[in-house]
Image (cartoon, rainbow, N blue to C red):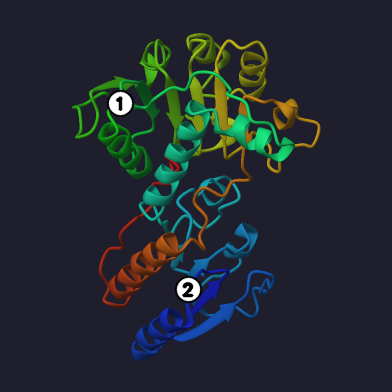
């Protein structure tokens, strides 16, 4: 019986503790670095995979019972390429809320306070005011996606004095740190007359293209779009045109419709866009790595005891 790890952000001490837990139950552990891809023969008899393994490899492991991914997004495993419906799939949803909400808050504050322009002026040795700044205090923010990340961002925005709207599949109840909740079908209404639209949507069939050209058209010239979910949840062409024509104020984008973002994309050279290469919730960030370890250790303890696992993914929904 084997448990295999690949491309995981664990310290040596954490790895040793997992080895001891597995060995105590009679399991052999195998560890692979990010650049090493094992073969199906090497993983023969493997019951558990933890980390990033090629999806086509998963279907070649008849003994496999459980796949744990360090990520929150699992669309690559939930799609048609995932050929093992009896294998339990778990993710690390909840591990990234602090880091990503801080990223979104950072990006929003940078744009509101004109920091990209001042950073550019600093490189050019220009001492010049760049116009009036805006505040999160008193602003209206729509959070699209009210899971762990959206909830943690809402708490931070609310603490700074924002009025926070939330958007989710069903508008049931108004959770703490939200002032009102809209259903996904009311998205165009939810983004009207707001200062920022903050997106933390999972990648599913339902969310693909959710921020359509019609939704973008419902925004106003002061709206800042922040996206740390999936790039393909937005009509990127419509977003780009709205930014070029100043129909919305700015965008902070950690994700793109196609990644890496093509070098000829106009988004690279726009002064009202802040771009980062999908790093807002990196596994290796210490706070994320610790959360991933705790989630997996708890699940491994449950698995060895024959108990139901936490963070089980509903593959029909994609999260």
Q: Residue at x 50, y 60 (%)?
A: 283
Report the Cα–Cα distance between label 1 and label 2. Answer: 37 Å
The label number, if any, that marks residue 162 in the structure image: 1
Q: Residue at x 47, y 55 (%)?
A: 85
Q: Percent from the top left, x then y, of residue 71?
A: 48, 55
Name which of mark 1 and mark 2 comes first in the sequence: 2
Residue 115 position (above or below residue 318): above
Using the rendered image of the protein, determine whether residue 12 is visible from the camera's viewpoint. yes
- Packing grade of label 1 (10 A; few <14, some 14-19, many >=20) is many
Q: Quadrant of the C terminus?
A: top left
Q: Nearer the viewer, mark 1 or mark 2?
A: 1
Q: Residue furthest front?
A: 127
Nearer to me, 288 or 181: 288
Q: Percent from the top left, x then y, of residue 123?
A: 71, 40
Q: Residue at x 76, y 36 (%)?
A: 262
Q: Residue 15, located in which quarter of the rendered image? A: bottom left
Nearer to me, 204 or 224: 224
Using the rendered image of the protein, determine whether residue 319 is visible from the camera's viewpoint. no
Left of 317 or right of it: where is 120? Answer: right
- Packing grade of label 2 (10 A; few <14, some 14-19, many >=20) is some
Residue 228 position (above or below residue 55): above
Residue 248 position (above or below residue 111): above
Q: Percent from the top left, x then y, of residue 180?
A: 24, 21
Q: Which residue is mark 2?
A: 10
Q: Percent from the top left, x then y, of residue 245?
A: 66, 10
SS class of the residue under badge 1? loop
Residue 54 position (above or below residue 78): below
């Amino acid at each position: 019986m084997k448990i295999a790890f690949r491309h995981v952000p664990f310290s040596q001490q954490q790895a040793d503790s997992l080895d001891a837990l597995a060995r105590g139950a009679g399991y052999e552990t195998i560890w692979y670095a990010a650049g090493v891809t094992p073969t199906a023969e090497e993983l023969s008899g493997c019951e558990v995979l933890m980390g990033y393994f090629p999806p086509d490899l998963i279907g070649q492991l008849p003994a496999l019972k459980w796949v744990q991914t360090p990520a929150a997004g699992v669309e690559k495993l939930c799609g048609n390429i995932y050929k093992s419906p009896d294998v339990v799939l778990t993710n690390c949803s909840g591990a990234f809320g602090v880091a990503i909400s801080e990223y979104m808050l950072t990006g929003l504050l940078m744009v509101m306070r004109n920091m990209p322009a001042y950073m550019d002026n600093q490189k050019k040795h220009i001492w010049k005011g760049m116009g009036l700044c805006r505040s999160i205090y008193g602003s209206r923010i729509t959070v699209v996606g009210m899971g762990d990340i959206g909830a943690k961002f809402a708490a931070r925005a609310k603490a700074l004095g924002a009025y926070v709207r939330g958007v989710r599949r069903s508008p049931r109840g108004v959770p703490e740190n939200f002032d009102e909740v809209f259903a996904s079908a009311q998205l165009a209404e939810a983004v009207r007359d707001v200062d920022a639209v903050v997106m933390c949507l999972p990648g599913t069939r339902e969310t693909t293209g959710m921020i359509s050209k019609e939704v973008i058209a419902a925004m106003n010239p002061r709206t800042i779009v922040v996206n740390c979910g999936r790039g393909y949840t937005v009509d990127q062409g419509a977003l780009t045109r709205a930014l070029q024509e100043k129909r919305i104020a700015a965008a902070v984008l950690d994700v793109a419709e196609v990644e890496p973002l093509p070098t000829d994309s106009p988004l690279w050279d726009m002064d009202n866009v802040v771009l980062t290469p999908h790093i807002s919730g990196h596994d290796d960030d210490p706070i994320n790595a610790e959360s991933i370890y705790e989630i997996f250790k708890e699940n491994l303890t449950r698995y060895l005891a024959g108990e139901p696992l936490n963070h089980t993914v509903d593959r029909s929904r994609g999260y």
